[in-house]
Image (cartoon, rainbow, N blue to C red):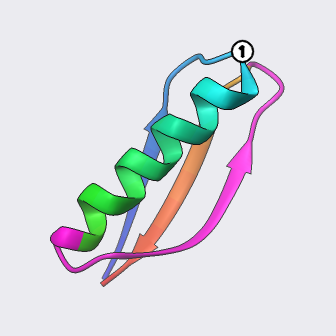
Amino acid sequence: MYKTVVIEYSPKANDMAKKIEEMANKMLQDGYELITMSITGTAKAILVFKK
């Protein structure tokens, strides 16, 4: 099963990295593994997880 999560607007790289790490750790606790991600031109991130 796949799950997609969007990290909202975060223009600073350090803040974005922290939010991605937090979400990846949270999803890992639920049994999901981060398989890919993409950063948009509008400073959002799209994370794809697989269970």
Instruction: Report whether 3 appears left or right of 40.
Output: left
Q: What stretch of residues is rendered in magenta?
A: 29-42
Q: Who's the residue at 71% across and 15% down the image?
A: 11
Please determine whether, in this image, residue 46 is positioned above or below residue 36.
Answer: above
Please determine whether, in this image, residue 26 is positioned above or below residue 5.
Answer: below
Please determine whether, in this image, residue 28 is positioned above or below residue 27.
Answer: below
Residue 41 lies in magenta, yes or no? yes
User: SS at mark 1?
Assistant: loop
Q: Who's the residue at 51% across and 46% down the image?
A: 20
Q: How many marks?
A: 1
Single out the residue that lies furthest toward the right: 41
Instruction: Report whether 17 appears left or right of 5.
Output: right
Q: Which residue is mark 1?
A: 11
Q: Who's the residue at 43% across and 70% down the image?
A: 49
In the picture, which quadrant includes the C terminus? bottom left
* 35 or 26, nearer to the observer: 26
- Three-letter amino acid code at disc 1? Pro
Q: Who's the residue at 47% across and 36% down the image?
A: 19
In the rendering, at what x and y percent does residue 4 appear? 43, 56
Residue 35 lies in magenta, yes or no? yes
Instruction: Report whether 2 appears left or right of 20.
Output: left
- Dot 1 alpha-carbon crowd within 10 angstroms: few under 14, some 14 to 19, many 20 or more: few
In the rendering, at what x and y percent does residue 48 appear? 51, 64
In the rendering, at what x and y percent does residue 44 appear? 64, 28
Please determine whether, in this image, residue 1 is positioned above or below residue 41.
Answer: below
In the rendering, at what x and y percent does residue 29 appear? 18, 70
Specify the quadrant of the image occupied by residue 42. Answer: top right
In the picture, which quadrant includes the N terminus? bottom left
